Image (spheres, rainbow, N blue to C red):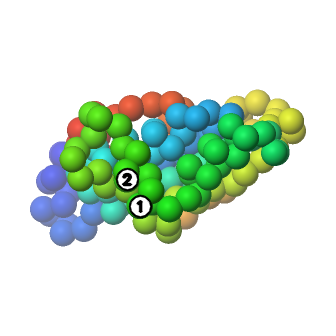
């Protein structure tokens, strides 16, 4: 059955937890923006991200600010292939942990930490921090 069938049968929308481990990746926020702008039901998508950055590095601090900053500001930075009215997440839809990149021990540890941000959503999707989505991916 398709997600539309589930919606029609149960009149409920299953939630999706998207796990993202990021190591100094400036594409993390564009990935999140793309994910929400192309979801049919963005209100059911929740992100858990572990962001590994160097403390005090300007580029890394910019990455952090892009992730935790105002959703309104990110809507203005949406890429050209997104809809004209990009959908951005509410603050309660993104959960994050910041780690010092100097202490990184590899992607498995960061992915494991991402799972600590899971809150019982119906589905889990683990992705890289530099991905793009198809329209209606959810």
Q: Which residue is mark 1?
A: 72
Q: Is residue 102 above or below residue 7?
A: above
Please tell me in which quadrant of the rendered image residue 6 appears: bottom left
The reply to whether callout 2 and callout 1 are in contact (CB within 8 Å) is: yes
- Seen from the viewer's position, the closer of residues 1 and 88 is 88
Q: Residue at x 43, y 65 (%)?
A: 90
Q: What distance separates the C-alpha of mark 2 from that of mark 1?
A: 5 Å
Horizontal and vertical percent position of residue 36: 35, 50
Q: Identify the residue shown where x is 73% and y is 51%.
A: 98
* x, y percent for residue 64: 65, 49
- Whether residue 111 appears in this view of the structure is no
Q: Is residue 36 above or below residue 106?
A: below
Measuring from the top left, give residue 131's x and y in whole percent: 45, 31
- Which label number is shown at residue 75? 2
List the single residue furthest toward the right: 103
Dot 2: within a 10 Å radius of its alpha carbon, few (fewer than 14), some, or many (20 or more) residues? some
Kindly identify the residue that appears in the image at 37 percent across and 53 percent down: 75
Where 67 falls versus 27 (above or below)? below
């Amino acid at each position: 059955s398709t997600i539309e069938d589930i919606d029609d049968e149960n009149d409920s929308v299953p939630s999706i937890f998207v796990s993202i481990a990021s190591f100094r990746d400036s594409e993390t926020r564009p990935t999140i923006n793309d994910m929400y702008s192309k979801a049919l039901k963005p209100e059911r998508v929740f992100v858990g991200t572990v962001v590994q950055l160097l403390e005090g590095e300007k580029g890394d601090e910019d990455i952090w600010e892009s992730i935790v900053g105002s959703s309104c500001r990110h809507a203005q930075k949406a890429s050209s292939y997104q809809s004209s009215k990009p959908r951005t997440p509410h603050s309660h839809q993104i959960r994050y942990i910041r780690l010092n990149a100097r202490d990184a021990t590899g992607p498995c540890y960061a992915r494991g930490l991402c799972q600590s941000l899971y809150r019982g959503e119906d589905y889990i999707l683990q992705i890289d921090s530099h991905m793009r989505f198809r329209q209606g991916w959810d």
